[in-house]
């Protein structure tokens, strides 16, 4: 089993103490960045802000093991993710897409797993979702810093009101209190919320039609000692051996393969 370290990357990243994990002789650690807004099953975060598990942590550990090194996991604010990776403070960040982060495609790996987003409303006042027109005039709760290209023009024109929250739990809270008409987030985070709060399941209606389906990838820093080709080879082996599909299935996610 490969040992890993996890710590928070804050505003003073340069002063963060050295991690306890050590890479194989002559090989650097693989620094994997994650956004602190993600919830189980993508990430498990224990107070005060320590990454303790989840699909993305295990994925980072597996990629590192394929590279013959160890993973160092960093928790960052969503708004700092692009700068953290592209600025060289982290080597990779996974479960993102070129559709969400405007970075040249030459810095993106092969597809890893798809993200399926759905519209959630109150069961007592279900919002039928068949097209974007159904969201016109609505207040939609979403995670802070996340991009929704399909709705951007509607957000900017005021046809749809965007309500930002930092955590999935707060999206559901806003909806439950009548402070939003619906929320949009990934079905894996919806499932994770109901696993944590099973008594809440009957309160909400989940759209049968997906809002979006996006192949997620890993963003690789141009300053990383780990080249994109090496990361792709590691991911390719994990997919071919069935390791990645099994991991996704274990966390209730589709491998898309």
Image: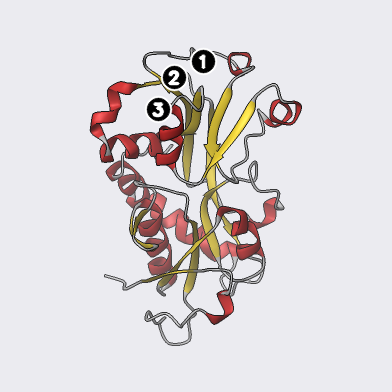
Please name the residue shown 36% across and 51% down the image: 55
Q: CA distance from mark 1 to mark 2?
A: 6 Å
> In terms of secondary structure, where does tag 1 sit?
loop
> Closer to us: mark 3 or mark 1?
3
Q: 56 or 173, which lies in front? A: 173
**21 shown above or below 45:** below
Query: How many badges with numbers are in the image?
Result: 3
Quadrant of the rendering where the N terminus is positioned: bottom left
The circle on residue 176 is 3
Left or right? Give the position of 46 relative to 23.
left
**236 shown above or below 170:** below
Q: CA distance from mark 3 to mark 1?
A: 18 Å
Can see residue 214? no
Q: Residues within 10 Å of mark 3 (few under 14, many from 20)?
A: some
Left or right? Give the position of 238 relative to 156.
left
Q: Could you tell me residue 50's position as x and y percent?
A: 37, 64
Q: 215 or 13, which lies in front? A: 13
> Closer to us: mark 3 or mark 2?
3
Q: Earlier in the sequence, mark 3 or mark 1?
A: 1
Q: Are marks 1 and 2 in contact (CB under 8 Å)?
A: yes
Q: CA distance from mark 3 to mark 2?
A: 16 Å
**167 shown above or below 238:** above
Outermost residue on the bottom side: it is: 25
The circle on residue 129 is 1
Report which residue position mark 2 lands on. 207
Q: Could you tell me residue 148's position as x and y percent?
A: 62, 35
């Amino acid at each position: 089993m490969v040992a890993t370290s996890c710590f928070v990357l804050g505003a003073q990243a340069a002063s963060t103490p050295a991690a306890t994990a050590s890479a194989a002789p002559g090989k650097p650690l693989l620094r994997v960045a994650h956004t602190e807004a993600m919830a189980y099953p993508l990430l498990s975060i224990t107070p005060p802000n320590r990454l303790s598990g989840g699909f993305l942590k295990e994925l980072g550990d597996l990629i590192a093991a394929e590279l013959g090194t160890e993973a160092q996991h960093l928790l960052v604010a969503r708004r700092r993710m692009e700068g953290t990776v592209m600025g060289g403070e982290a080597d990779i960040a996974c479960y993102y897409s070129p559709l969400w982060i405007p970075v040249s495609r030459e810095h993106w790996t092969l597809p890893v797993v798809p993200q399926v987003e759905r519209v959630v409303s109150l069961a007592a006042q279900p919002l039928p979702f068949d097209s974007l027109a159904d969201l016109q005039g609505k207040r939609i709760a979403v995670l802070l810093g996340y991009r929704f290209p399909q709705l951007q023009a509607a957000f900017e024109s005021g046809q749809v009101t965007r309500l930002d929250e930092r955590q999935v739990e707060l999206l559901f809270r806003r909806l439950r209190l009548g402070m939003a008409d619906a929320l949009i987030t990934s079905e894996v985070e919806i499932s994770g919320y109901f696993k944590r709060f099973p008594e809440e399941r009957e309160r909400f209606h989940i759209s049968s039609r997906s809002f979006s389906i996006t192949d997620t990838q890993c963003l690789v820093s141009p300053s990383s000692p780990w080249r994109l080709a090496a990361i792709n080879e590691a991911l390719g082996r994990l997919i071919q051996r069935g390791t990645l599909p099994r991991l996704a299935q274990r966390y209730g996610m589709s491998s898309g393969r």
